[in-house]
Structure formats: structure tokens, C-alpha cells
Amino acid sequence: MCKARLTHFPFRAVVSADDTQPAMRFLETFFRHRIVAILPVVLGLAVAAGYVLVQPRQYTSTASLWVDLTVPGNAAASAAEQYEDPSTYLQSQIQELLATRSFALAVGQSGGLISYLQDHPQSGASGLAAIPGLGALSSSGSAGSVDDRVAADLPNMVSVVTAGPQVLNLVVSGPSPQLAAAVARALIREFTSQVVTAAQSDDQTSVSYYGQQVAQAQLSLQQAQQQLTEYLAAHPKVPADGTGDATATELYEAVQIDQTSYQSLLSQYQQAQLDLANAKSQSGFEVMDAPAAGGTAVSITKKLVEAGAAGLLIGLLVSALIVTGLTWADRTARDAADVRRVLGLEVAASIEQIPGGTVTSTPAGET
């Protein structure tokens, strides 16, 4: 009977004549090709860390706003909004304005973002575009105008966070602390301008409306007074309040109703005029903490941890695929079953290498 010699690895202490389990063969392949198996993990971690480190450094500038409930127009206008915090209402206003191109360009122009991007065309590069040698490749054919970049990037640069029912924090990030602070100040100025302009427009509409109503009420009052005067002149015995005369009483009551309506509309008209005069000085909020010019550098520790976890996961996946492929392609005969499958021969005995130098012989078919 032909005999075959089996090669054993130190990892296997006992060789059985039964088929080797897939998990054991996988581990054997891993230890045979440990460098190849570990290399994808190392490369994944290195690429992830390098990707984060080459990204442009970011700085933040923070401002705190206090919403003034005493300013007309800040209270919820509908029953559904009565349970919404004033800071939440202001937050939604700022976020809606940031989504508009005209407001974003106004902030970018006032805060120096447009001029900065014109002087530093590559300052906004991030992701693959921030990697040396890949910037031109990743941005070719997709680079827009500076205005387009400002309109697209400004909403991502600004975080609007409620810190309380009446406190709102604006956090602006930028490639330099000075620019972040300048954009934060410009955002507050432009938002104030938008609020004041909207309030003035509403107040002007109210003044025009109540002005017309007062004029009509005054005309109606004059006509009622004239009718009463003419009737009393034709009936000199009737008292001025129309007592004892049905027609005079009706005319007198009409004058009183028109007088009350006129006074009410006149009061609303005067209040609208007062609101219009005060609109310029009442934005509905106050700046508690102005944006600091120094700014604060954004920590990259969290990004490194997140990128490292992603790189580790991808590296482990690639390593598992490589080891699985090597295991499947491995045709090395390690036991009696492998010899029968590969060579078509029967094994008479196998020699075990036991740690410590002891050699044992196991006849084929024995356990």
C-alpha cells in the first residue's frame, strides 16, 4: 500500500483522520498568511486617518440671542403655535431664510465670505477634493460660481440651536476664526434687517388699512350727525338725545354707534402708526453674546474615531474575504481525508509533532 507523508503546522496539536472543520482551516490559512490578512486592516486605518487629517481645519464662532416676547409680532399668531417656544419660532425663521439664495448671498457679501472664496478658490474643498492630486479630478466639470458655492455652503456652515424657551445659539463654522466671526455678525445683521423690513411692511399695510377705515368711519359719522342735526332743526321741541321721538332716538343711536366705531378705528390707526415708528428699533431679539473674533478650533478627535471605526470595519471585511479566498484555493494535504481527496491514496499512519519534541505515530484508522 502506498503511503503519503503529511505536513503539519505547529498550530495543530492533533490531526484527525476526519475532515478538517472549515473554521479550523480558516484559522490555519490566517496564520499561514498573517501578514496578508493584517495588511488590509492596517491600510484601512491609515487611509481613514489620513483622509481626516488632510481635510481643511474648521473654526467656529458662537452668538447667543434672547427672544423678546414683549415685541409685537413675536407671540404665536395661531392657536397651534401657542405652545411653540419663541426660540423655536425664531430658529425656523433663520433656517428658512438660510435656504434662500438672496439671503445667503447677502450674508456672504456682508460677512466677507464671497471675497474670501474669490481669493482662496480651493478653500472650500473637502472630502476627496481636499486630498492633494485629487482636487482637480474630483471637481472637474462640477465647479460652480462663487455665488453658487455660497448659496450651497452657507446653510451647512450655520447651526441654529435652541438653548432654552427664549435663548437661541448661532454656531458658524469657517476655514478661519476671523471669517467665522465675520459671517456670524453678518448673519445677525441681515436677519435683523429682514425682520425689521418685514415688520415695517406689515405695519405700513396696517397704517394704510386703518387709515382708510378711519376715513370711512369719519364720513359715516358726519352723515349721521348731519341727519340728526337736520331733524332736530325741523323739530325744535324734540330733545337733543331724541327722548320721546322714535325717529330722533334712532338717529341719535346711529350717531352713537358711528362715534364708537370711529374711536375704535382711530385708536387702532394710531397704534399702527406707533408700531411703524418703532419698527426700526425692535427686531424681536437681543444679542446676549456677540460672536468672538478669536473663534474656536473644531476638534477632529470625534472624526478620527468615526473614520477609524469605518476603516477598521472595511479592513476586517477585506481581510476576511482574502483569507476566505486563500482558504478555498488552498489544496495542501493536512490529514488523511485530504490525501484521499488530492492524491487518491490511503494513509497508513501519520507522525504527530508534539510540543516538547515528543513524536508519536498514529496508525491510519485509529483515533
Image: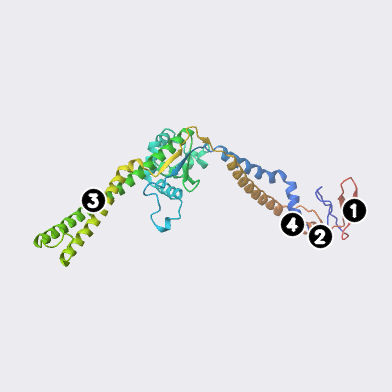
Residue type for callout 2: Asp
Q: Position of residue 356 (x, y in %)?
A: 89, 45
Determine the CA span between mark 4 and mark 2: 12 Å
Instruction: Give the mark nearest the N terminus, 2 or 3.
Output: 2
Secondary element at tag 2: loop
Q: Which residue is mark 1?
A: 361
Residue at the disc numbered 3: 211
Q: Is residue 119 left or right of residue 232?
A: right
Circles 2, 1 touching at the beta carbon (< 8 Å): no
Give the Cα distance between marks 1 and 4. 25 Å
Amino acid type at circle 3 is Gly
Give the residue at mark 4.
22
In the image shown, does 223 or 321 lie closer to the viewer? 223
Q: In which quadrant of the rendered image does the C terminus lie?
A: bottom right
| Outermost residue to the left | 234
**Mark closer to the observer (2, 3):** 3
* Residue 287 x/y as whole percent: 44, 39
Q: Nearer the viewer, mark 1 or mark 4?
A: 4
The residue carrying mark 2 is 18
> Distance from label 4 to label 3 (Cα)?
91 Å
Q: Position of residue 76 (x, y in %)?
A: 40, 53
Picture quarter with the N terminus: bottom right
Q: CA distance from mark 2 to mark 1?
A: 17 Å
355 in relation to 119, above or below:
below
Q: Is residue 19 above or below residue 121?
A: below
Which mark lies nearer to you, 4 or 3? 3
SS under mark 4 = helix
Instruction: Point out the tag, 2 or 1, that comes first from the N-terminus.
Output: 2
- Image quarter for residue 284? top left
Question: Upstream in the sequence, badge 1 or badge 4?
Answer: 4
